[in-house]
Image (cartoon, helix red, strand yellow):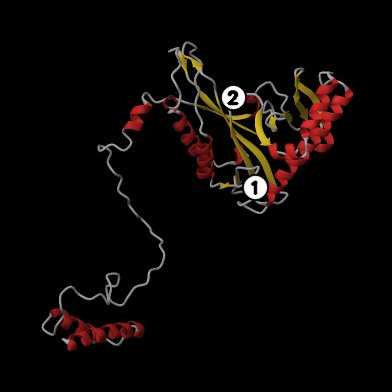
């Protein structure tokens, strides 16, 4: 998706995100080491809002939706998007939670069976139980994705819609003594797919003493289930989760420069020395208003501030205008004479 987005829109998005990140020192405590430059900070809500504004996206994050946004490109391509942010060196990332469902379906009983065998989750029976639980997770995950597609706001879902994860990954802290190092934000992208039930394969428990947490793959992505919080996590290291680092899904890298004193910027945002910006309206399309015959909105029928009488030069101009050449458009003369008659009527009453 990223390579198909409009360049000017991408530049606007980059500007919004990097400018926000340039204020990172205002949102984090200073390191005790003066030689350390802190990692850039990304606010997830600001990221979503910036994505929407920059790419004219529709925000889909309503209710229990699995997606955050949708976009339709100029060439007709349609994308539904999961928007995420995490450190470039981070591990598995949470993509779903099944707390209520796991309790109702007693997923914990499957984990207890594995623990009672005391085989470190490595024998065939343990793997069968892990596979049973992985299928339950996959079915529920896929149902949520399917339900989210049916609720799309941005456009009607069809087979031509592609789902992707759009990720912003800030670098870690940087040592000033390393001249080639600088804070940056890496833009990443990978597929956002349902779990392939036909190709589930159990990797095994994360640790021999943590049998309640296990990993599995469907050939497309590498997943991890943590039983304590009923969370499903996914690896973003490479497009199938088996890469060396999150950088494997990188599509663009943005350097970040911190402003010298972010607190001074915030302190002066609404100061008296700040000059207001005058609005200059070049075009206005507004709603219709009801105009009374005599009101400040109507120059023809608006009553004059001073009384009009027969000695007033305006009266004679009106008489003269009402006797214009009949070659003028008949509809114009008809309307003008109606106004003139109304004015004459006012004068006669005085």
Which residue in the protein does label 2 denote? 88
For residue 206, which quarter of the picture?
Answer: top right
**Which residue ends up furthest to the top in the rendered image?**
177
Q: Secondary structure at mark 2?
A: loop
* Quarter of the N terminus within the rendering: top right
Marks 2, 1: nearer the viewer: 2
Please, is residue 341 above or below residue 7 in the view?
Answer: below
Residue 114 point in image, percent of width and height: 82, 25
Residue 77 point in image, percent of width and height: 65, 47
Residue 300 as seen in the image, left or right of residue 90:
left
Residue 241 point in image, percent of width and height: 71, 27
Q: Measuring 50% from the left and 38% from the top, which residue is drawn there?
A: 46
Asked whether disc 2 touches disc 1, contact meaning CB atoms under 8 Å apart, the reply is no
Q: Measuring 23% from the left and 76% from the top, which residue is drawn there?
A: 303
Residue 253's disc number: none
Q: Measuring 44% from the left and 32% from the top, which residue is drawn there?
A: 19
Please, is residue 135 above or below residue 260 in the view?
Answer: below
Residue 187 point in image, percent of width and height: 58, 31
Residue 342 as seen in the image, left or right of residue 285:
left
Q: Earlier in the sequence, mark 2 or mark 1?
A: 1
* Quarter of the C terminus within the rendering: bottom left
Which residue in the protein does label 1 denote? 78
For residue 324, say whether it is visible.
Answer: no
Please, is residue 178 above or below residue 148 in the view?
Answer: above
Q: Measuring 32% from the left and 83% from the top, which residue is drawn there?
A: 335
Please, is residue 20 above or below residue 286 in the view?
Answer: above
Alpha-carbon neighbours of circle 2 within 10 Å: few (<14), some, or many (≥20)? many
The CA distance from mark 2 to mark 1 is: 27 Å
For residue 323, which quarter of the picture?
Answer: bottom left
In the image, 60 versus 11, the foreground residue is 60
């Amino acid at each position: 998706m990223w390579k198909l987005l409009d360049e000017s829109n991408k530049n606007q998005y980059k500007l919004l995100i990097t400018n926000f990140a340039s204020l990172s020192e205002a949102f984090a405590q200073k390191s005790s080491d003066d030689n350390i430059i802190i990692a850039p900070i990304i606010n997830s809500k600001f990221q979503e809002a910036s994505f929407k504004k920059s790419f004219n996206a529709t925000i889909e994050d309503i209710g229990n939706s699995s997606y955050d946004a949708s976009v339709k490109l100029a060439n007709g391509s349609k994308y539904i998007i999961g928007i995420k942010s995490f450190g470039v060196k981070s591990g598995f990332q949470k993509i779903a939670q099944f707390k209520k469902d796991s309790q109702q379906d007693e997923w914990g009983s499957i984990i207890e069976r594995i623990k009672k065998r005391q085989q470190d989750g490595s024998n065939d029976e343990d793997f069968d139980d892990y596979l049973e639980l992985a299928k339950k997770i996959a079915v529920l995950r896929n149902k949520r994705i399917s339900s989210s597609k049916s609720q799309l706001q941005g456009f009607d879902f069809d087979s031509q819609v592609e789902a992707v994860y759009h990720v912003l990954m800030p670098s870690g802290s940087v040592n000033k003594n390393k001249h080639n190092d600088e804070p940056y934000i890496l833009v990443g992208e990978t597929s956002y797919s349902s779990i392939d039930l036909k190709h589930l394969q159990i990797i095994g428990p994360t640790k021999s003493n943590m049998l309640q947490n296990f990993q599995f793959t469907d050939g497309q992505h590498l997943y991890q289930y943590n039983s304590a919080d009923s969370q499903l996590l996914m690896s973003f290291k490479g497009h199938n989760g088996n890469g060396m680092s999150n950088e494997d899904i990188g599509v663009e890298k943005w350097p970040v420069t911190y402003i010298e004193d972010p607190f001074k910027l915030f302190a002066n945002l609404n100061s008296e020395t700040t000059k207001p910006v005058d609005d200059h309206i070049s075009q206005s399309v507004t709603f219709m208003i009801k105009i009374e015959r005599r009101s400040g909105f109507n120059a023809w029928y608006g009553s004059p501030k001073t009384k009009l009488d027969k000695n007033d030069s305006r009266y004679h101009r009106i008489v003269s205008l009402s006797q214009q050449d009949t070659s003028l458009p008949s509809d114009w003369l008809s309307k003008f004479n109606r106004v003139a008659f109304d004015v004459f009527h006012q004068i006669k009453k005085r």
